[in-house]
Image (spheres, helix red, strand yellow):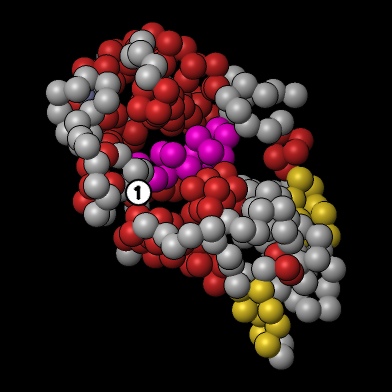
Amino acid sequence: MCKVGGGRGWFQEELGWEVGRGDKAKFWEDVWIGSVDLKSLFPRLYSLSLNQGKSEGEMGVWVDTEWRWDLRWRRGRFVWESSLERDLNTLLSGVILRKNVQDIQVWGKEVPGRFSVSSAYECLSKHGRGNHDEVFKLLWKVKVFPNVLVTAWRVFMGRLPTRVSLSRRGMMLNSTVCPLCLLHEETCQHLFMECKYAQQVWSQCLPWVGILFVQHHDLKLHFQSFHLFQVSNKQNKIWKGVWVNVIRSIWDQRNLITFQQGVVNAEEVFQRAQLSLGCG
Ligand SMILES: [Zn+2]
């Protein structure tokens, strides 16, 4: 069972719940909406939740036949966390608990009646931007760990907490400068595309994939450029997986530097992305 990249093994990944009254499946930790546990989808909210380890049925009340969620938090949310909470509520609004039905454990992602992972994210993408473009369709097909996929999804949705994005949402920061190069403001565009360290990572990655160069600096177009006409669809999906893993790897490195005073090493970032790919 492959454990590289911090994810769970594939067998566990396929285990999920068809939720009835919410008596067995754990709200945050188990897979019961789509194929991603909510803990991976909303790590920040999970860390603030007072309901860790609880089942769905312990996190709300029945008012006659209608289920009402009542999620408990350690403290009030910051502005940027509230937008995460809205995302979570949007997902939950599509869930119908059934009072007289027990939860059943199921194996396999495409269980009738369950959200598929793509429908869960699609729901959020539509809600957030009002459009649903080709990029998201391509993204849902990529086979990588859910937490890696979520990072790319947040990048495309403009919801990754970069320094600039946090400061726009009202958070007081000492600096909005990119922690990798210390030269420019840290936006997603800069961090993943324009930063000299990101450029070093891509310059190792492109020849490895067999792409001569990518002329776009736009993140979505850059992702779509990971496509070669002479190879199969399956192979192109793998290349898109490489892209997603590189993004996650840069983000991990950025977090390491921000929170643990790590150092930048473009080669290591790319090698980590390659390692994670083995498990996609
Ligand atoms: Zn930079």
Q: Which residue is mark 1?
A: 159
**Looking at numbered disc 1 in the image, what kind of residue is underneath it?**
Arg
Q: Image height check: is 83 above or below 213?
A: below
Q: Image height check: is 62 above or below 2?
A: below
Indicate yes or no whether the magenta region holds residue 95. no
Where are the magenta residues, as a range?
139-155
Query: Quadrant where the C terminus lies?
Result: top right
Q: Residue at x 59, y 19 (%)?
A: 278
Q: Residue at x 70, y 65 (%)?
A: 56
What x and y, as percent, mark residue 110? 69, 52
Query: Quadrant where the N terminus lies?
Result: top right
Quarter containing ligand 1?
top left
Q: Decide which of 74, 16 is in the foreground and name it.
A: 74
Q: Decide which of 92, 259 is in the foreground and name it.
A: 259
Q: Is residue 117 visible?
A: no
**Mark 1 secondary-structure assignment:** loop
Q: Image height check: is 145 above or below 213?
A: below
